[in-house]
Image (cartoon, rainbow, N blue to C red):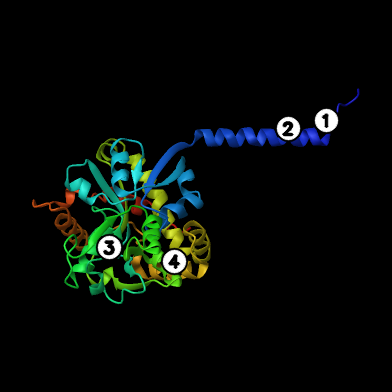
Amino acid sequence: MKRFRLPIALVGCLVTLGCLDTAAAAVAELARLRISIPGLGTTSYPLIMAQKKGYFRAEGYDVELIPMTGGLAVKTLMAGEVNLTSAGTLVASMQGAKLRMVMGFLRQLPYDLVAAPEIKRVEDLRGKKVAVADRGSVTFMVARAMLQGHGLEVDKDVTILALGRPDVRYQALLMGTAQAVVANVDGTGLLEPKGYHSVASAGKYTKGFAGSISVAQDLFDKRPDEVMKYLRAAVKGARAYLALRDEAIKITSQWTKITPAVAAKVHDYLAAGALAPDGLIDRDVMEVAINEARDGAGIKRAVKHEEIYDFSLMQRVNDELRGWRP
């Protein structure tokens, strides 16, 4: 009996098609996960590391990171158009939005007030314009604290420009639309070689945190296991960033378009204690953040921690991942 042999090229083609079918089936099994982020900066590093290392995929998700302003991030989260956000939700929660902050990223405020060359000190910003993300954001809170530390009041002595994403804010400084901008640590590294300089660092004026994960209260209450999947991937991303220095520098420099040298300095800063490997924020820091947000938004009533934060699921994830290493 004659044996029928398929041409090698055809066999290779069939094998390839079979692999493609398998890959397509695997992708089809992944649930879509949309995450809004405030921009391509430091506070998004745990999420981009989790995406690049496949931690979201391991939890069954095909993740999409979508830069958007804080106000829009809150609206899309409440409308169910995104699954979670890493934008600030403090003020929105105080104003009645049914959200819960479930994880924190940075235990310190990684922000500088970066100014044009002619601005030698903070006092020189009297009558000038300072760019922030939006008026409910941590960038507004730290701008307010730094300006007040030098006898300046927002809206009275200094005009605040709410411009959204970091790249838009930095462009406003470069174009002269603003004379200073609140920049995170990688933004400062991006702007300094262009002749701009820091006139104040947030940590000297106030305490706080930056970067977080918030979800809808309904999701938190009804599908906690789903939220834990998000948290598991994100905290693995944070730990991977800290542990895998060279890889983290490569990924984040490509992500933010900063040089590897600047990315290395950012890594040194975050690894020195700023980035939380457990996704938890100290209670006294949370209290300061609440008070700063209340003052900035003109909210008079007392605000309880339980209205804003719930790290119980984050604690459970940490218990599960005790001893985990990337």
Badge 3, how many Cα within 10 Å: few under 14, some, many 20+?
Answer: many
Disc 2: which residue: 14
Viewer-proximal residue among 5 and 238? 238
- Residue type at mark 4 is Leu
> Which residue is depicted at the point 14% across and 57% down?
295
Task: Name the front one of labels 1 and 4.
Answer: 4
Residue 284: x and y in percent read 19, 63
Q: Cα distance, mark 4 to mark 2?
A: 49 Å
Q: Earlier in the sequence, mark 1 or mark 4?
A: 1
- Disc 3 or 1, which lies upstream in sequence? 1
CA gap, disc 2 and disc 1: 10 Å
The residue most toward the left is: 301
**Residue 296 in view of the camera:** yes
User: Which badge, 2 or 3, comes first in the chain's sequence?
Assistant: 2
**Is residue 206 something one can see in this rendering?**
no
Q: Is residue 117 left or right of residue 299?
A: right
Secondary structure beneath dot 3 equals: strand
- Disc 4 is placed on an element classified as helix
* Label 2: which secondary element: helix
Please tell me how crowded label 4 is: few (under 14), some (14-19), or many (20+) other residues with Cα within 10 Å.
some
Q: Is 222 on the left or on the right of 61, as rendered? A: left
How far is mark 2 from mark 3, CA to CA?
63 Å
The numbered mark, 4 or 3, whose residue comes first in the sequence reads 3
Q: Picture coordinates of residue 224 (x, y %)?
A: 31, 40
Q: Nearer the viewer, residue 234 or 315?
A: 234
Judged left or right of residue 307, residue 42 is right
* Residue labelled with disc 3: 129
- Per the image, the residue denoted by label 4 is 190
